[in-house]
Amino acid sequence: MTKATPFLMFQHGKAQAALDFYVEHVPDSRIDSVERFGPDGPGPEGTIIRAFATIAGQEVMVHDSFIAHGFDFTPSWSFFLDCDDAAGFDRLFATLSEEGAVLMPPGNYGWSRNFAWISDRFGVSWQLNLA
């Protein structure tokens, strides 16, 4: 084994939209490479076989599953983001929670002066911490 890379599997062709959303709204994020299914499949043409991206400085691998699964993302796996200032925290909270779910609203929970836990519109979980 040479390294471990977090792997995000999206369903229903949502991988590209999720990547675009993260690159637009999460600092230090970019799409590094994308490989797509062609006309011969097995997944729908244009969906992502494998993409490598950097999200908040963390390399991740992304895939569009063409197989329907009875499972999806859970909050037991999340991105933990340390925010430098309150404005950045507030912006990320508003953006990432829009059309998602607030699991723990912003507040002082004793280990952080401001912390929140959310699930975004794609089902990916985020812990936000005001450092």
Image: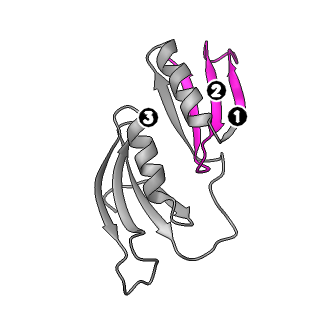
Name the foreground residue: 34 vs 83.
34
The image shows residue 55, relative to residue 6, as above or below, that is above
Taking the spot 37% from the left edge, 76% from the top edge, the residue there is: 37
**Position of residue 40 measured from the top left corner of the image (x, y, whole percent):** 37, 87
Taking the spot 48% from the left edge, 51% from the top edge, the residue there is: 18
Crowd band around label 3 with a 10 angstrom C-alpha radius: few (<14), some (14–19), many (20+): some
Inspect the magenta stretch and tell me whether residue 70 lies in it.
no
Structural distance between the alpha carbons of marks 2 and 3? 17 Å
**Position of residue 52 measured from the top left corner of the image (x, y, whole percent):** 33, 56
Label 2 sits on residue: 116
Q: Earlier in the sequence, mark 2 or mark 1?
A: 1
Q: Considering the numbered disc 1 on the image, is that residue within a helix, a strand or a loop?
A: strand
**Position of residue 19 measured from the top left corner of the image (x, y, whole percent):** 42, 50
Structural distance between the alpha carbons of marks 2 and 1? 8 Å
Crowd band around label 2 with a 10 angstrom C-alpha radius: few (<14), some (14–19), many (20+): many
Please state the extent of the stretch shown in magenta in the rendering.
Answer: 103-131
Taking the spot 66% from the left edge, 51% from the top edge, the residue there is: 74
The image shows residue 88, relative to residue 121, as above or below, that is above
Amino acid type for the residue under numbered disc 1: Val
- Residue 25's tag is 3
Marks 2 and 1 close (CB-CB < 8 Å): yes
Q: Earlier in the sequence, mark 2 or mark 3?
A: 3
Marks 1 and 3 close (CB-CB < 8 Å): no
The residue most toward the bottom is 40
Drawn side of residue 100 relative to residue 85, left or right: right
Q: For the N terminus, give its image quadrant.
A: bottom left
Label 1 sits on residue: 102
Foreground mark, 2 or 1, reads: 1
The image shows residue 10, relative to residue 130, as above or below, that is below
Amino acid type for the residue under numbered disc 3: His
Taking the spot 67% from the left edge, 64% from the top edge, the residue there is: 71
